[in-house]
Amino acid sequence: MKRSPENLSPGHQQTDGSAPKWIVIGLILLALFLVSRDLIRGDGSEVFDFRTFSQLPTQHGGRVQPLDSVARNSLLIFRGRQSALTEDGQSLTPAQFITEVAARPEKSDELRIFRIMNPQVKALVGMSGEDRRDFSYRDLRPHLGEVDQAFEAINPESEQRDAYERAVAHLFQSLSIYHRLIHSFAPPDNLDGVVAEYQNFLLSIPDGMEAIRSHERGEPHDSAQMRRFVGFTDRYMRLGQLASLRLILPPEGDAIEDDWQTTGESLIGTIQTGSIDPMVEHYARAIHAYRRAEADNFNEQVAAIQDHYRDRFPSAAAMTQREYWFNLSQVFYRSTELYVIALVLVLFSWLLWPNTLRKASFWILVIAFIAHTIGLVARMWIQGRPPVTNLYSSAVFVGWGAVFLGLIMERLYRNGIGAATAALVGFSTLIIAHSLGASGDTLELMQAVLDDNFWLATHVIVITLGYSATFLAGAIGLIYIIRGMGSTALDRKTAKALGSMVYGIVCFALLFSFAGTVLGGIWADQSWGRFWGWDPKENGALMIVLWLAIMLHARWGGLAGPRGMMLMAIFGNIITAWSWFGTNLLGVGLHAYGFIDGAFLWMGIFVLSQLTFIAAGSLPARFWKSPAAAR
Amino acid sequence: MKNLLHFFTSLRLTIVLLSLSLVLVFFGTLDQVRFGIHHTQELYFRSWVVFSPVLSLLTMLGAREFHEGFEAIRFPLPGGYTLGTLLLINLLSSHLYRFKLSLKKSGILLIHGGLILLLIGELITALFQQDTMLSMDEGGPPVNFSRDFLDNELVLIDRSDPELDTVVAIPANRLRRGHPIEHEHLPFRVETLQFHPNSSIFQIPRSQRGPERIGNLRGLAADHDLWAQGRAKTYREREVNTASALIRLSDDEGEIGTWLVANVLPEHFPLQEFEHDGKTWGIELRFRRVYKPFSLSLVEFTHERYPGTSIPRNFSSLVILDNPETGERRRDLIYMNHPLRYGGYTLYQASFDNQDTTSILQVVRNPGWTLPYLSVTLITLGLFVQFGMGLVRGLSRSNHSPGPATEKSAKASPS
């Protein structure tokens, strides 16, 4: 590897370019610690084995996932965070939360898990006086009737709801998810006696069935026995209907994709089989043990469920466990932090210790990129799919592609620009991904039409890399404007170097956007018999291709100098954002009510900010501190 | 003349045209919210000029209520045909004018050759593509036609022969007031008293119908007090226009009767029939049918969901294809991403109905379907050649000297 030649980082004073080596090493070690801290930190499983409990499987949303994922996604929906708050402000892990829900709902009712921001909705549940945002089920219980009524009254068309109506719908949805979780593990009204209850139920079956048969034949029968038995079946039927989690493996001989059962359904099935399913039994015993604070017993029961699953479906069990570790690592959050640190370091490197800080930021960026890659690969492994399957994963992948290209740029030019833009785009796209991921399971299943790995792996990947490159070019444009107007560092040579960086990236972007669009056309022709249908998403891709073609022609024709290319690259950000999100907004009732919608508002802010940069960058050379860059 | 040549071969023109295309595509996307894909496509991309209203921008910005006057603020944009033609001229003339065959320019040449093909392909698609729907019921009769839900036809059916119906179909765009239609197979004249491209059909007693003077009402309008009132056409996806017409038939002896026909009636009522000269006739307005040389019958429609959810996993139709001309008879499974291609048609699973017992296929026929493949092959090749050469040159140069390497190659490649 060539060490950075001095003449490639122009505009800096080389004399104080280095600081003690330990700073670099220290920063890198810090980054390594930051990125892995969730895995190092304990998860409160020292006494009660929350970890194994939250690794237990459930078939939910059509796929098998660990309870941990259910807990995290539910909490994300409830309060936008992957944690629950106790009344005295302590934070519980998702694993602890789901254990409480299963075994001590009376305690989980006290957890502050429902976030209410809308003042009208706060008033609706009688909490106007409170200045907190998170409320417990117990806080809300006296007002459930009002929430139901308010939900009945709002606009049934979800796309046409205003802020209050959306908040009501959100609260209603959160409450019902919670309610259904409570009913998923065992009958919540008799958890202390649940083990005995199941035994009594089992004992009541033969006599109860006999009594019913006699009753049907019109013969004399023991009506007390019959009532007892029917009471049980009604109870478990209702339990089965209220539950959302299918916790019990499909009957022996069925495959893992077949229908799993809820606890209630499995108990009803007991009438046929004559024995309680071992998983139901172990869950009951685990709950019982947890309530009596018998940690060893609880841990044994939970391990027994785990073993049962592992014996039947070893490879699926391994995958469920992997998903748990993937969740725990929070790898995308952690790489976001590192991108911010890298960006700050690069920015500082333009003021102080250019070589040291740039080197440190480069390696931190590499660590962040490796973490990002691991996350991406883990998702692919767990899902068995190419990396991009929904809007969330497209954000993750756009960032990944841009960081990759930025790192290459940094290696080639060693002037901090590649690193800065990589960090900027990596950070922004992961932030976008986080906010998209707050709406639920990001490993969700795909609609039938997208269910084709070949095309997902080609068309979607290629076109997403096109987005990455366009954003990267736009980010270079932004940095060009900021440095050129705000500092004297952007001399002619650097400006030229940046110009050729943008040119190279734009060529790459055009190649990928065009190829991606064409692959999409071929997929469309293969599936629908038409290559092109002027549909919003297709048009968005076409707009990127057109814009990049305009940029290249303008440069070839000498109509745009380096500055012109930069301004056009920034405009490319707008076009790409439109193609990526704007077209989705169109479908989501943009026509009438998009304005308040979070996504649309952010889109507007983004467009305005980019236009501001373009306007500023168009000012005459006397406004530039580096006039050479204003050509 | 030289000025003109200069104009048409200039790179500035290319940039202007590409920029206008960008604007056109943008507005052509926005307006889909109001006009749906199909109509917008006609307005923007298959036209010479389009008057794009400011309204579509405003609605995008979230304005819920606006002054009606905004609807009137429009600005003209060159349509897809105009831009396509000009781009073609621009491309062809600059290549002819500055034509020099060299290895260096082979990339550009390939790219632009491909683009020309792509434009032509889109033109052929615009002119000749047929897009219709075919719906079949599980265990129902074989179906040998598809329907175009955007177009209608009035049919008069001679049902006197129990073996064979003779059908005269009149395209809906010929149904105009004051333009009676005669046909050699029709013993009467067809007059359109009213035609609504979209309407509401409802039941209302004759006495309350308002002042229209209609002659001898027969059929559903008389028996069920059905009536139609015109309303604005809808362009929304998944909404269908209820076309309706009042048709008066008359022969030399005078009026035979007047019928209310509408494209939604055949679904709910039996064919409206009448006797004339000892023959039984039927009359109806229906979605335009396109007959196929083959028929399909649905053996089974399957709609799989992911366990415990309503998320569809797959839709598939098991069909029997029967072609009496070739004697071909075979089974085919049509499912997501796997259409049936037969006889120049592509049939793909588009929808379903009646509790998963009716399968609806989209039937597409596009005679220009091979052109995009050819063109993108050329363009892709060209892009690789062009940027590949640039990259190789750039890399080899940056090994020798730092700094921007692509500058020269960029200057050396005008289009």
Image (cartoon, coloured by chain):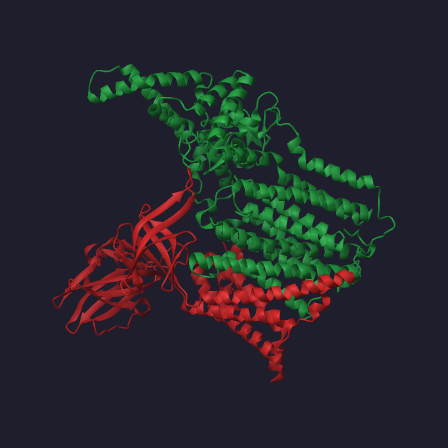
Chain colours: A green, B red
* Residue displayed at 26% across by 61% down: B261
Image quadrant assignment for residue B17 = bottom right
Q: Residue A97: give x, y in percent of width and height.
A: 55, 27
In the figure, residue B181 lies in which quadrant? bottom left
Give above or below for A332 relative to A71: below
Outermost residue, left side: B278
Where is residue A75? Give x, y as percent.
Answer: 55, 33
Nearest to the observer: residue A192 or residue A116: A192
Please say if A441 is above or below B188: above
Q: Is B331 drawn above or below residue A282 in the view shown?
A: below
The quarter of the rendered structure image containing the C terminus of chain A is bottom right
Q: Which of A337 and A129 is in front in this view?
A: A337
Q: Can residue A186 be seen in this view?
A: no
> Observer-nearest residue: A529 or B262?
A529
Residue A164: give x, y in percent of width and height. 51, 40
| One can see residue A299 in this view | yes
Where is residue A499 shown, x and y percent of the image? 72, 61
Q: In this view, does B343 lie to the left or right of A578?
A: left
- Of the pair A124 and B56, the residue shown nearer to us: B56
Q: Which residue lies furthest to the bottom in this view?
A: B1
Number of numbered discs present?
Answer: 0
Q: In which quarter of the image is residue A629?
A: bottom right
Q: Is residue A406 left or right of residue B255?
A: right
